[in-house]
Image (spheres, rainbow, N blue to C red):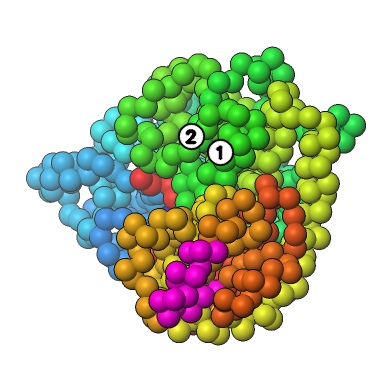
Amino acid sequence: MCGITGYIGKTNGLPFIIQGLKRLEYRGYDSAGISYIENSKIKTYKKKGTIHILEKNIPGNINSTALIGHTRWATHGEPSDNNSHPHNDCNNNLSIVHNGVIENYSILKAKLLEEGHKFTSDTDSEILAHLIEKCYDNDLLSAVRESLRYLEGPYGLVILSAKEPDKIIAVRNGSPLVLGIGEDAMYVASDVNALAAYTRNVIYLEDRELAVLTANSYRTYHFESGEIQKTIDKIDWDLVEMEKKGFKDFMEKEIFEQPESIGKTMKGRILKEFATSKLDGLNMRTSELEQIKEIHFVACGTSLHAAMIGAMWLENYVRIPCRCEIASEFRYRNPVVRADTLYFAISQSGETKDTIGAMQEIKIKGGKVYGICNVAGSTIARLSDGGVYLHAGPEIAVASTKAFTSQLAVLALFTLLIGRSRNLSPSVGMQWISEFEALSSNMDKILAQMDHIKSIAQKAKNYKNFLFLGRGLHYPIALEGALKLKEITYIHAEGYSAAELKHGPISLLDKDMPVMFIIPKDELYDKVFSNLQEVKARTCKVFCIATEGDTRVKEMADDVIYIPESREMFTPFLTVVPLQLLAYYVAKLLGKPVDQPRHLAKSVTVE
Ligand code: M6R
């Protein structure tokens, strides 16, 4: 979703504004723009399309010490030059960039129009510039604070004023903003990725906080309680992790990184001596673990699929009732929240609005909620009562891959931890630990089959639709395989439990409906095999993910991708990898923009 950069300093801030926006490209956008102060006047350039197009349309000699930048992901008003940010007031005295949605904008706009303000876009955001203009009386901070009283809905907002060119103001209420503290320069951005090359010292604004930044000072305020002191956090990862490292796309890199990233997730978290794991960030004593009666997960998209598998593990192996829910549904159905239920929010970005909303609902109802997320310092990480970081490294491609397998690793480690505190024997614990230790090399074996998977992609790319079928632990994997394919190739794909086939989707089957079966050797193998026969009898092309050595499947399927044999619990780590690769290669063959598929955003920061 929208990306924001802002700079105030003693030297030209344009390189940061543009580089920062490029670092935020992965969030998804359709247009880009900048405003800056030059000779006490605001200059604005904005364009539909890429940052590259914007760069070609701005003067080559910009030299400004006060600037704001934006990449827009359209919500109100189509992608166009006019609807792009920044938006300025009637007299071109101030300029704003906004991420979020002003829910009551139509009422505010009608009032502002009545008062004579002139609008140039169809966006909700433009009202912000006019509202601050209306409230301005020689004090930008007061005008901003006064304006905020009228706003409903989430916003991250940065304001530049020609009348007070020595400062920029950053406001957060529901959409993330991070301050970067530099030497003779202050920065602001939607996330730390934009800041990392310029400073390692950052301050995360919380909801209902704002900051006034000058070249060498920053002051932070709470909307209600006035000035506040905030702690400075350090960015602790290496910039090189944000590079493609020789791969063509971030998605390709992230898929191939999984043997390593999963290792990082597990590092220091296995206690062989006691056949268990340790997850320090949870801050839960064994006695607290023992009191848990139920576990509920809230998440969206790929993170939800990981949660579904975690829930199955916990019920099956630890006998704790579990429930998984789409975060956006959970938050609005007035759920029952109980003190003896453990709530987990799972999110790669830690900024997904719907998941944050679900967490807030749990907290309002007196529950404690724990986070499983990748981005350190993210909103979900800070809102959690405790949690576990994935340590998978930055995930840049919109389609989530390595975060998924790391989420599974955390959930499996948690299953081991709570299992060992209850019924799970040391010998089973040790068997699981051997499986954890084999994961990276098993993944390597699958990645080594990339040429075979590419050849299947050649066949798959010609279809308009695709079905993914699996059962048990591989039902969520079927959903994930379908999600990967549809989001980056735009081929319509559905994931189903193979058993559901006869309850509807079987009517779709013909030669134009290929089916991908996830059919490893597990408890439900024979049942899925029957489904496979039913599908084959209906002239469909059949692709399979099966366990090494399974010749029965080979006889029936048109193509098989084999995964190494492993204990049933650990197969989802392996079955998902070929599906990620298949989606990637199909997208490449179709010439799609793999890392930034149309309409999608990496962090979904609006509802
Ligand atoms: O950052 P999160 O894990 O909270 O994101 C949730 C979904 O938006 C995300 O998984 C989305 O479905 C991905 N594009 C899937 O590849």
Q: Are marks 2 and 1 in contact (CB under 8 Å)?
A: yes
Who is closer to the viewer here, 29 or 294? 294
- The image shows residue 31 at horizontal and vertical percentages of 39, 66
Helix, strand or loop status at disc 2: strand
Residue 311: mark in rendering: 1
Location of the C terminus by quadrant is top left
Q: Position of residue 505 (x, y in %)?
A: 35, 63
> Crowding at label 2, few (<14), some or many (≥20) Cα neighbours within 10 Å?
some
- The numbered mark at residue 323 is 2
On the image, the x and y values in percent for residue 474 come to 56, 54
Q: Determine which of the numbered discs, if any, sits on residue 237 in the image.
A: none
Residue most extreme to the right:
273
Which residues lie in the magenta part?
529-543
Q: Residue at left 69%, top 81%?
A: 451
Q: In the visual, does 403 lie left or right of 542?
A: right
* Residue at 46 percent of width and 46 percent of height: 300
Looking at the picture, which amino acid does disc 1 mark? Ala
